[in-house]
Image (spheres, rainbow, N blue to C red):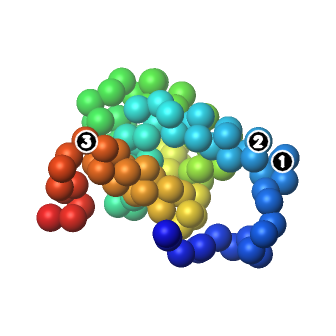
Amino acid sequence: MSQNRSAQPPGRSPTAAELERSARILRLLADPTRLAILACLRQGERGVGEIAQGLGRPLPAVSQHLARLRDGSLVTVRREANRSYYALANEHVELLVTNTLEQAEHVLYPLPPHHR
């Protein structure tokens, strides 16, 4: 069995508000483009154009996804002149994205790439 790494005290159940917010976060992660954007941002702050180019997606589509991620508090935005730069909101988002992608590797491969 895995260690309890939760910040919650043992035996404390999540509140209804915490469960609802968690489900909202997972719905945001359920879109492959949004997950790819978050994975890209694990490498650091990026401009919208750089993200769009890296993903091979149209800039307007990436901007719409970033707006949803920002509304969900998963990314932050820094504006400089007429440009916007995005970053992951905190280390928990980075861990969530990494753990999600690594779990997918466990399902897809006999020896997941992150174990090689």
Residue that label 2 marks: 20
Q: CB under 8 Å between callouts 1 and 2?
A: yes
Whether residue 40 is visible = no
Residue that label 1 marks: 17
How packed mark 2 is, by other alpha carbons closer than 10 Å (few <14, some 14-19, many 20 or more), is few
Position of 112 compared to 9: left or right? Answer: left
Q: Position of residue 93 (x, y in %)?
A: 54, 57
> In terms of sequence position, does the residue under pointer 3 or pointer 2 come before the other?
2
> In terms of sequence position, does the residue under pointer 3 or pointer 1 come before the other?
1
Residues under labels 3 and 2: Cα distance?
Answer: 29 Å
Residues under labels 3 and 1: Cα distance?
Answer: 33 Å
Q: Name the quadrant containing residue 112.
A: bottom left
The residue sitting at 33% across, 27% down in the picture is 57
Residues under labels 1 and 2: Cα distance?
Answer: 5 Å
Residue that label 3 marks: 108
Q: Position of residue 75 (x, y in %)?
A: 57, 51
